[in-house]
Each structure stands twice: as structure tokens, then as C-alpha cells.
Image: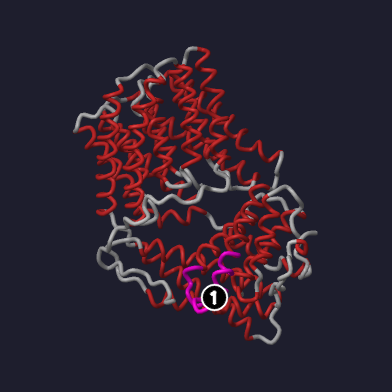
Amino acid sequence: MSPRRLPSPGTPGRLPFAGVLRLGRPSPIWFKPALSVVVAVAPPNLTLLALGRLDLAMYTMAGSLCALYAHNRPYAARARALGWVVLGMVAGLAVSLVAASLTANAVVLVTVGALLAAAQKTLCDATRVGPPGNVVLTFISSAALFLPQTLGQVPGHLGLALAAGAWAWLVGMAPGLLRPHGPERRAVAQALNATAGYVQRHREAPDAADDPGPRAAPAAAVQAAWQTLLAPGARTDATRRALERLVVRAEVALAAPADTDPERLRAWSRDLRGTAAVPHPDDLADDDEILGVEAEVAAERRPWAGRLRHLAPLAARTALGCALAGYVSLALGVGRPYWALVTAASLYQANLALTWSRAVQRVVGNLIGVLAFAALVPLAHLHQAVLVLCCLALNFGAEALISRNYWLGSVCVTPMALLITEFAHRQDSGELITERVVDTVVGTLVGFVAALVVTNRRAGDRLTQALSTAERARERAARLLAEPAPAPAALEAARRSLTAALTDLRTTADAASGEWWQRALPQERVVAAERSGHRTLAATVRRQGLLLARHTDGGAEDVRR
């Protein structure tokens, strides 16, 4: 098998169609955000319903929807992340409500919304807050721009959002009382399972050993496991150290797949899914298993602000696309231009190819979602309680389905967004449907055109930097290998540094290859760096003596404590 090559980006290539709408496997924790958002949204909305003030639900939902975030993070890191999400949501809402109270000029409001959307996109990407990213923040802040508002009402409305956000924070943290290491166990289990799949494929097709492509997914899973285990504030205890040893095993298997038993990795992964004790690999001493962890912790503590400069083109795309989408919607006489703005904001991904895929998914999901709204709205009009229950069901459905494919989740998100507009008073369904279809088409077309106009030439610069980092990491590991007796901790730190550099190189190369109108990418250099890097990793593993023993006679019992 020939190694994967980067497409030449000097001129435009084909935009992807195949597989854009294909359904994938659901997220292993799809039910967690789905249940969390229902639990976070239901009490405030039902309370407002009982008080006859469902018109205030938009403000409480701003806080409640924060429960969607940070489900993959350890609880110490989740507490901080959720806190910042709540504050960010309330801050964006505050800007929108103040703007709405100071002016009714739709052009000004759209401009404010576009700038907010760009800021939210940039900060979410820089801090790597994770799904659902900036879209929920932008939906709330953009919709709030067009709510009737006075300055005197703003503090009370922000108070409702903050109270609901505090409840969402409690909902997000509550599972930690039952499974304090749940996120870490899931991350390590995914890394072990992904690595086992790679090892199995390597055994079936050993001639593809030099192809760096198949290593990308398991390497990313291993890196994600380390980031979860080494998150700031994570507790250092026996469980975490046992999980660290399992991630080391996954790293070793990835570097030397020919010497690894995939069934042993799968057995460990299965054991981590439940609540039993963490499996304890017994083929190495404890002190040798966690060499270099401290060095990796220090390496991971890089300020997120340093990533902002690389996101400038994406911020410009978002600001321009959202503003133009809103202006075109206004010119067409649509009463809710923020829908077009939010549609444009939802498109922008790491590169143009991914942005195109998201555009197709958005259009398909929204159009089917409009049909779902047409079917649901007669039921929702029976009583406001039914309206609230319909929105709760759609909240659950959106989070349950969106990990299969974005368009499938949008089938639930679209009718939910339309029904929310009826919390204050009943709307004309035909007008809502027409405006939503128009805004979907306008937001998608104008947003994608903005992505074509604002090119990301910095993608090539980032790839060059990632290449240099990977080459330096490989040279450092090679120098240590050449020494007669390298320090074990130094060799382990070099191996992990090289692993991280190769993962970042693949991610950066994939992102750069999806951009148009930039200088030619160093394709051969990327392939050479990945090949030599993975060979050095394998040599490092063999030098350390970290190879896993093969177990062919039902090794599941051997991996238990």
C-alpha cells in the first residue's frame, strides 16, 4: 500500500461529496449530554410555565444549554471549563441585550452579532472547549439581539441566565459523585480499543507498515487520553497512575504493533468500561511505567493565547460571513436575520473542505427539520405544556443523534429552534417555515462564499512549524538511542515528545490539505518525517524493553489484578 499523500493545494481541488451524509457510530457517551441538557432545561422551563412567564425561557435556556459542554473532561477540569462556559454565555448575552436596548437598527445589530460570533468562534477554538463549540453561544447571543429589551430589564434577565447556568454546572458535575474517574477511564478505553484495531490491521497487512495514515486515529486517541489524565487539577492517586500505565501500553503497541497482542488491549478496554478495578499490567515495574510523565505535564502547560494568531483567518471568515449573511437576509425582508447569521457561523471548520461538508449537512438537516416542525407544530399548539415537552424531547434527540452525523442532529435542532420562538406567543407557522428555509439557504451560500474569499495561508506556516518540531523531536530521540546508556527518564520523555509531535503533524497536515489557494505543501517531507519518526519510535520502544508479552491463550484473566 502506498503512503497517503497530501493533495496539492496550489490550485482548487474537488470538494467532497462522497460520505458527507454517511452515518457514523454514535458517541460512546451520547446519552450523557442528551440527559444532562434535559435535566438542565426542564426545571427552569417548567417553573416558568407554572408561573405563566414562559416568555422568559430564552434567558434561562442560555444558562441551561451550558450543560452540553465538557463531558469528556475529568471533573476537576470540567468544573473550571463549565464555569468559564457559563460566564462566556452570560457575557455574550449581556452584550446582545445591551445592544438591543440601545438601538433597533437591524444593520447595527447584525454587525454586533457577527463580531460576537467571530469572538466566540476564536475563543472556543483557542481554548479547545470541545463540542458543541461556538454554535450554541452564537445562537443565544444572536437571538437575544432581536428581543425587545430595555436597559432596566437587562440585570434581571442576566440573573435568570446565571441562575440557570449555576444549575447546569451542578448537573454537569453530579456524575462525579458516582464515578469520579469516569472520563479518564473512557478516554483510556478508547485509546486501547483504537490501538488494538491498528495492531490487528497491521497483522493482516504487514506490507502497509510504512503507511502513516492508519496510525493517525489511534495516535490521536492516545494523545487525547494523555491530555485527559494530565489535565490541570487532576488528582494523582492509585487509579490515575494505573490508567497512565495502560496508556503507556497503548503507546508501546502503536510503536511496535508486530510485538503486541490486540486481544490483550481489548480486554483491558472492556474492563475499563465498567466499575471494576482498573486492570494492572504486571510486565513492568511501576517506576518504569510512568517515566517522563512529569516532563509531559510541563510540556502540555502552554498558554492557549499563543494559538490565537493562527486563528485570525478563521475569525475573519466568521465575521465576514456572518455579517454578509445577516445583511442579505435583511435585504430580502426576512424578519429574523439572526438565523442566517447563526447558519453561517455554524459552517466554519478547520479547513475549507470540512466547511463545505458542514454546509451540505446543515442544508440537508435544516430542510428535513423544517418538515419535522410542520408535523409537530399542531401538537405543540394544543397547550404550552406540550410545547415545553416537545422542546425537551427535541433537545434529547439532537444530542443523541448529532454524533452520528451533524445533519441528523440538525433534524431535531431546527424544529426545536422554531418552537422556542413560540414561547412568548404563537407565531404564524407558514411564515416561520418560509423564513427558516430562506435564512438556511442564504446563510449557507453567503457563509461559504466568505470562506472562499478569506483564504487561510497560515495553514502552510503551521504545517512547516509542525514539521520542524517533529524533526527535532526525532533527532533528539535518535541521539539518545545512539548513546551507550541513555537515562531511562530522558529516553521516555523523548519518546513521548516524538509521539505528540507526530500526532500534531498529522492533524496539521490534514487541516492544511483541505485549504485552497495557498503555496504548495511539502508533501514528500511530511511523508518522510512520519516514516522516520515512527521507525524511531519503534526503535525507542525496543531499546527501553517495553514490549508487551504475547498472550494467545485467553489472556483476559492475566490482565486482572
Q: Position of residue 6 (x, y in %)?
A: 37, 70
| Disc 1 packing (10 Å; few <14; some 14–19; many ≥20) | many
The correct choice, above or below, for 554 with respect to 104 in the image is: below
* Residue 20 horizontal/vertical position (percent): 36, 52
The image quadrant where one finds the N terminus is bottom left
With 268 as the anchor, is 444 left or right in this view? left
In what element is the residue under mark 1? Answer: helix
User: From this viewpoint, is residue 99 visible?
Assistant: no
Q: Position of residue 354 (x, y in %)?
A: 36, 54
**Is residue 60 found inside the magenta-colored segment of the image?**
no
Q: Residue 332: x percent and y percent?
A: 19, 32
Amino acid type shown at disc 1: His
Any part of residue 66 in sight: yes
Q: In this view, does 404 lie above or below 4?
A: above
446 or 256: nearer the viewer: 256
Residue at image position (66%, 57%) is 269
Is residue 201 shown in magenta? yes
Q: Which residue is drawn at 41% across and 35% down?
A: 413
- Residue range (magenta): 196-214
| Residue at the disc numbered 1 | 534
Q: Residue at x 77, y 59 (%)?
A: 560
Magenta stretch: helix, strand or loop mostly: helix
Work out whether residue 557 or residue 327 is closer to the camera in this orientation and state it: 557
